Image (tube, rainbow, N blue to C red):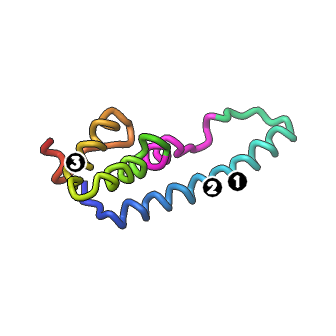
Amino acid sequence: LARNGFEQVFINYTNEKLQAIFNDATFRKEVEEYSKEKIPFDKHDFPNNQTCLDLIDKKPMGLLSLMDSECLRGAVATDQSLANKFHRAHKGHSNYMVCGPASGL
C-alpha cells in the first residue's frame, strides 16, 4: 500500500462522508419510489460505508477520538504510541490494515 499522509486521511474521510450523504439521499428516494410502486427489491443491495466511517469517527474508539486522547498526553505522546493505540483498538477491523513504518510492531 502507498503511504498516506495525515492530510490524505482527512481527504479520504471527507470523501467517505460525502459518499454516505449521496447514498442516503439517492437510495432513500429509490426505496420510497419502489415502495410506492410496490416493486419488490432487496434493501441490502444498496451500498453502505458506515463501517468505514465508524472506524474513523465513532466515539469513543474511532481513530479521531483516539488521536484526540493521545494529543492530551502532551509531550510523552509519539507517532509510535498513537500507532500502538490504533492497532490495539482496531487490529481486527475489516477496514483497518497495519502498513508502512508501523507494520514492524
Left or right: where does residue 105 sit relative to residue 36?
Answer: left
Question: Which residue has dot 1 on it?
Answer: 25
Residue 54 magenta-highlighted: yes
Q: How far is the residue under mark 1 from the one under mark 2?
A: 6 Å
Q: Looking at the picture, which amino acid does disc 2 mark?
A: Ile
Question: Which residue has dot 2 on it?
Answer: 21
Q: Are marks 2 and 3 in contact (CB under 8 Å)?
A: no
Which element type, helix, strand or loop, lies under badge 3? helix
Question: Which residue has dot 3 on it?
Answer: 81
**Which residue ends up furthest to the bottom in the rendered image?**
7
The crowding category of the residue bearing disc 3, from other C-alpha atoms within 10 Å (few below 14, some 14 to 19, many at least 20), is: few
Which element type, helix, strand or loop, lies under badge 2? helix
* Residue under the image location 46 percent in, 41 percent down: 60
Residue 104 horizontal/vertical position (percent): 12, 44
* Residue under the image location 49 percent in, 41 percent down: 51
Q: How far is the residue under mark 2 from the one under mark 3?
A: 33 Å
Mark in the foreground, 2 or 3: 3
Q: Looking at the picture, which amino acid does disc 1 mark?
A: Ala
In the rendered structure, which disc, 2 or 3, sits on the residue that comes first in sequence?
A: 2
Q: Are marks 1 and 2 in contact (CB under 8 Å)?
A: yes
Q: How far is the residue under mark 1 from the one under mark 3?
A: 39 Å
Residue 41 horizontal/vertical position (percent): 72, 34
User: 49 or 41, which is in the foreground?
Assistant: 49
Q: Looking at the picture, which amino acid does disc 3 mark?
A: Ser
Q: Which residues are magenta?
A: 44-57
